[in-house]
């Protein structure tokens, strides 16, 4: 046998020996990095068409949180089981809504950290720990709710009011810009929103006498492209809705993520309470554009229209809700609407092309307004302002709902919201503004135990503003909602449950006790054809799927 | 030398004579009483509390289940002295939402806040009650028959709250109101549930815990029952106490004695 034949024989033997190895161990299941392709603006525009991914905070630019996945559906959701859990090392409450991009999940953690894990197993690729100063001014806990992605870059808000760009493959910092001075009470907690080549992002600090704004940064360089203040400056229209110099410290923060309509080229963003929260004496007037929906030109940030839900608010009824956009049949024709269940306990359907009020009704117990006039402006009940001695008002400070995401189903045409029927005593105090100090002018106290109040998931028909069904939960929940083409509504509760309801009827189809408060919104995605549903509870991100 | 130089400053501190010369106390306090504890200081502390602390602890400092912030009006679980309170305010509590006060806040203002937090709970040595705790102990196990439902130091019944340390969380006025009008402010743990199961069974008991999907009770025989709500046909929630009012059944002097006894029930330090 010559050398060549000998070599061939050796190769053949080696090949035969190696065959069983290949058969037993599929390298594509064990070693390969998922095919991570850059997230173009085109992909974000059509995010609903790749339901295996969850590409932005609210799933799609219209913020419906509706997924076209239907592998898990009303007939089999009862067989869901735990697939994996990811434990966040920093103990705090998790308000995170992860993103999933081609098999990789990006999870933000308290206080301002970010981790990339395998979306099928929960095992880590990399993590980024953001260094924070130890004299942060934050009102309500060390939270981060999520990131945005464009190309191969993630964009994250941090508690020291920075915006950080992070390489999605390695966790390396690409740029880190200061959005505002944290020492003056500014902070950032919300996921940014990508609009074309810009990173649109809000600011928190409404309890510290800040002046709110919405910013857009160049995704490539981190340069500020436009800033729109949520309180008009001197000489600008609306500045006269603030008495004296109160506009300078009027709050109107923007601490939740907005929505975008590419046809209208409008960015929709909610604004928070005017400050000081519970004492309006020194800020007489409507206090524009606090407690409002603002519609901004996506390229310039120019204000196109606004709708103020609660003029001259003295109860901390932030309009910090995620706007949901849909095209619905309304009075015989298709209308481009925005649906909004507000902290002030009213639900609104608004024409999103011009801000015109279409319909609105209370969806939770409220005692502060007699109703809405034809323009959607509340008709106040006299004498419900906070007093030095305290006055009982519904909804309480936490609202009929709050920042946690509502959902909308394209199948049922219903809007789903976590609602709270409670009351609280509101107090007023006199305070002078001091830089970096709380500037709230009062506060509130519950006079009954939480268990005495009523909470529920409510399904609202946006055409009639009527409640179609409700599912009771207890106590108050701060979980967001996700709907699917499987006919499901996924959400959770403060008593630590994660559950699935029939989107059409509200019937409970599945629940599991996760043990700690659910303080985030669920997402759904798929890897290798298998659908998963993830939800954070306590300090853990749990992921479920059908039994294998 | 008749005057011991090692201790002269302590004498001055105790007299308060030099307090106006002090700009503040050490940043991490280790000793010394609170010099800022006048009515004015407490008022200033309250102002600061309402502004900076009430978001989590509540305007009435009674805590908040939602934020996990504890009730500060009774015994504090993490600080037993004013210095302990001061240190928590300055340093925060690592790994919790309890952040330190602003770093540039003068010590004098932190001490005013300490004075307010301290004033939220009553110093029992300053309270003069007309009743006798010793007699109250006898009423408790005798005419009042309180121990048939309440435990004190491991002795007594299970149908009401354990009163071993009730003096730390209720002041004498509240204790009297508990005896005379027990149906006011009943904690959800002591509500009664009347449950008919889907199998037709009927049970009632104290509401140990209820959540969105399940319910747990203890019946009068101390059996513990856990129901998925899907197994409940109907459930009536009685938001009242099972305790009777003692306004008519005990004399005024018995009631005063009982209050004195219950107020004396606190952890031995």
Image (cartoon, coloured by chain):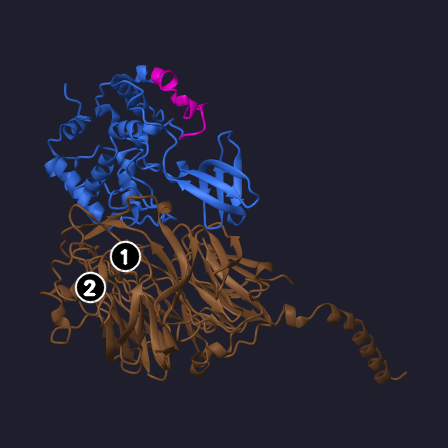
- The answer to whether residue A434 is left or right of residue A459 is left
Q: Is residue B134 above or below residue B18?
A: above
The chain ID associated with circle 1 is A
Question: What is the x, y in percent for residue B43?
Answer: 15, 41
Q: Colour of chain A?
A: brown
User: For residue A186: magenta?
Assistant: no
Marks 1 and 2 sit apart, C-alpha to C-alpha, by 12 Å
Farthest residue, direction front? B200
Question: What is the x, y in percent for residue B37?
Answer: 17, 35
Residue A129 in view? no
In the image, A243 versus A20, the foreground residue is: A243
The stretch of residues the image draws in magenta is B138-160
Dot 1 alpha-carbon crowd within 10 angstroms: few under 14, some 14 to 19, many 20 or more:
many
The chain ID associated with circle 2 is A
Residue A462 in view? yes
Farthest residue, direction left? A244
User: For residue B154: magenta?
Assistant: yes
In the image, A202 versus A290, the foreground residue is: A290
How many labels, in total? 2
Residue A311 picture quarter? bottom left
In the image, A10 versus B238, the foreground residue is: B238
Question: Mark 1: which secondary structure?
Answer: loop
Question: Mark 2: which secondary structure?
Answer: strand
- Which residue bears the numbered disc 2? A379
The answer to whether the residue labelled 1 contacts the one labelled 2, judged by CB atoms less than 8 Å apart, is no
Question: What is the x, y in percent for residue B113?
Answer: 21, 42
In the image, A35 versus B193, the foreground residue is: B193
Q: Is residue A295 above or below residue A472?
A: below
Instruction: Determine which of the numbered discs, if any, sits on residue A366 in the image.
Output: 1
């Amino acid at each position: 046998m010559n050398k060549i034949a000998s070599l061939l024989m050796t190769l053949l033997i080696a090949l035969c020996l190696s065959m069983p190895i290949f058969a037993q161990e599929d390298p594509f299941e064990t070693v390969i990095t998922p095919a991570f392709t850059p997230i173009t603006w085109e992909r974000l525009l059509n995010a609903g068409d790749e339901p295996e991914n969850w590409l932005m905070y609210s799933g799609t630019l219209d913020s419906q949180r509706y997924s076209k996945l239907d592998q898990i559906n009303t007939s089999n959701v009862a067989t869901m089981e735990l697939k994996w859990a990811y434990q966040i090392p920093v103990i705090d409450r998790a308000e995170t809504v992860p993103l999933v991009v081609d098999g990789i999940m990006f999870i933000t953690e308290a206080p301002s950290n970010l981790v990339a894990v395998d979306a099928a197993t929960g095992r880590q690729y990399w993590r980024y720990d953001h260094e924070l100063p130890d004299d942060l001014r934050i009102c309500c806990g060390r939270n981060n709710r999520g990131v945005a992605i464009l190309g191969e870059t993630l964009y994250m808000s941090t508690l020291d009011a920075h915006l950080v760009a992070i390489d999605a493959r390695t966790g390396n910092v690409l740029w880190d810009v200061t959005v505002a001075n944290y020492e003056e009470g500014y902070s950032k907690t919300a996921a940014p929103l990508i609009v074309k080549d810009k990173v649109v992002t809000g600011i928190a600090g409404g309890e510290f006498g800040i002046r709110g704004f919405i910013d857009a940064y160049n995704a490539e360089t981190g340069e500020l492209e436009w800033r729109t203040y949520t309180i008009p400056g001197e000489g600008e229209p609306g500045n006269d809705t603030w008495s004296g110099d109160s506009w300078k410290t009027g709050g109107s923060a923007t601490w939740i993520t907005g929505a975008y309509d590419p046809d209208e080229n409008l960015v929709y963003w909610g604004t928070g309470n005017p400050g000081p929260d519970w004492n309006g004496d020194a800020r007489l007037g409507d206090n524009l554009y606090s407690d409002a929906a603002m519609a901004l030109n996506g390229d310039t940030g120019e204000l196109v229209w606004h709708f103020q839900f609660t003029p001259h608010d003295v109860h901390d009824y932030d309009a910090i809700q995620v706007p949901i956009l849909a095209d619905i049949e309304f009075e015989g024709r298709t209308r481009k609407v925005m649906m909004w269940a507000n902290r002030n306990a009213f639900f609104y359907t608004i024409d999103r092309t011009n801000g015109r009020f279409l319909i609105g009704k209370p969806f939770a117990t409220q005692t502060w307004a007699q109703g809405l006039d034809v323009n959607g402006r509340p008709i106040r009940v006299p004498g419900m302002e906070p007093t030095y001695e305290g006055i009982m008002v519904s909804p309480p400070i936490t609202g009929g709902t709050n920042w946690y995401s509502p959902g909308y189903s394209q199948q049922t045409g219903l809007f789903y919201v976590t609602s709270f029927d409670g009351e609280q005593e509101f107090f007023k105090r006199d305070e002078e503004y001091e830089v970096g100090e709380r500037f709230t002018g009062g506060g509130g106290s519950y006079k009954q135990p939480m268990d005495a109040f009523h909470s529920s998931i409510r399904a609202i028909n946006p055409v009639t503003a009527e409640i179609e069904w409700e599912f009771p939960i207890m106590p108050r929940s701060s979980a967001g909602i996700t709907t699917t083409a499987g006919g499901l509504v996924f959400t959770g509760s403060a008593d630590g449950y994660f559950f699935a309801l029939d989107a059409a009827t509200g019937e409970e189809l599945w629940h599991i006790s996760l043990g700690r408060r659910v303080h985030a919104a669920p997402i759904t995605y798929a890897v290798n054809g298998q659908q998963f549903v993830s939800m954070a509870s306590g300090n853990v991100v749990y992921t479920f799927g059908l039994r294998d | 030398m008749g005057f011991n130089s090692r201790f002269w400053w302590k004498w001055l501190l105790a007299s308060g004579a030099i307090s106006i010369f002090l700009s503040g106390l050490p940043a991490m306090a280790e000793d010394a009483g609170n010099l800022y504890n006048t009515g004015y200081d407490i008022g200033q502390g309250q102002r600061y509390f309402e502004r900076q602390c009430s978001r989590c602890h509540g305007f009435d400092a009674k805590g908040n289940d939602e934020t996990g912030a504890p009730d500060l009006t009774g015994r504090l679980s993490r600080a037993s002295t004013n210095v302990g309170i001061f240190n928590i305010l300055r340093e925060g509590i690592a790994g919790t939402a309890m952040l330190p006060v602003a770093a540039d806040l003068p010590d004098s203002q932190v001490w005013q806040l300490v004075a307010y937090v301290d004033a939220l709970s009553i110093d029992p040595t300053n309270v003069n009650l007309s009743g006798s705790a010793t007699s109250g102990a006898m009423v408790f196990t005798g005419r009042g028959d309180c121990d048939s439902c309440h435990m004190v130091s491991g002795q007594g019944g299970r149908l009401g709250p354990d009163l071993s340390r009730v003096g730390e969380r209720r002041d004498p006025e509240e204790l009297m109101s508990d005896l005379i009008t027990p149906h006011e402010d009943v904690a959800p743990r002591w509500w009664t549930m009347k449950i008919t199961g889907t199998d037709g069974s009927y049970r009632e008991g104290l509401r140990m815990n209820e959540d969105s999907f399940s319910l747990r009770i203890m019946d009068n025989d101390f059996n513990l029952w856990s129901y998925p709500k899907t197994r409940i046909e109907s459930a009536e929630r009685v938001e009242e106490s099972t305790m009777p009012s003692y306004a008519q059944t005990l004399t005024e002097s018995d009631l005063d004695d009982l209050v004195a006894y219950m107020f004396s029930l606190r952890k031995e330090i």
